[in-house]
Amino acid sequence: MTDIALTTADGAERLRAPAGEYVVRLSGEQTGGSLAVVEYTFPPGAIGASPHVHHGHEEHFQVLDGEVTFDLADGPLAVGAGGAVSVPKGAAHGFRNASDDWARCLFLLTPSGYENYFREIHQALERGEELDAERLSALRAAYDTVTL
């Protein structure tokens, strides 16, 4: 049985992103692997993630502030604060901030594990590595995710 998980606002894990910041609100270590909750804040014009496909987990998004444009099979879809998008395993998607304001959204990752990808990005940035498309694709591949 998993204990009740709790992260205070001050106790969340803050991670650098190529643009903006990730905040791990709940990790798989806290939820017995069932779920991870990651908040992402990113600036105007930033690509949150180029198109990719997850084969190991589902990804659910809740837009908290601003507007996030999701690049889906049917074309781009702008989702404002309060909107949500659920992406099942195997569905191609990407997202970006095409607006003139900062955007903030929650990622609900089921099962957990992909939050470790964000940790690896943070560690690479802390080491001063360049995170070009090829490097990001290699990092994703380790988490059963294919860059398109």
Image (cartoon, helix red, strand yellow):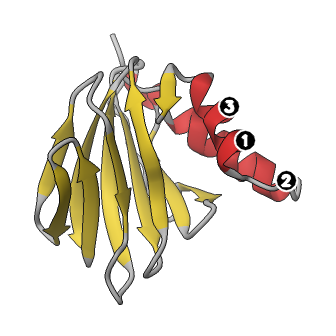
Give the x, y percent position of residue 47: 47, 64
Q: Which is more toward the observer, 85 or 93? A: 93
Q: Amino acid at mark 3?
A: Ala
Q: Of label 1 and label 2, which has the lower sequence position?
A: 2
Disc 2 target residue: 129
The CA distance from mark 1 to mark 2 is 9 Å
Q: Which mark is residue 135?
A: 1
Work out which residue is located at the far left of the displayed protein and give it: 83
Do labels 1 and 2 touch, CB within 8 Å?
Answer: yes
Disc 3 target residue: 138
Q: Is residue 16 above or below residue 60?
A: below
Q: Secondary structure at mark 1?
A: helix
Q: Which is more toward the observer, 136 or 32? A: 136
Q: Which is more toward the observer, 65 or 75? A: 75
Q: Secondary structure at mark 3?
A: helix
How dense is the environment of label 3, judged by Cα within 10 Å: few (below 14), some, or many (20 and up)?
Answer: few
Q: Is residue 107 above or below residue 31?
A: below
Q: Secondary structure at mark 2?
A: loop
Q: Amino acid at mark 1?
A: Arg
The CA distance from mark 3 to mark 1 is 5 Å
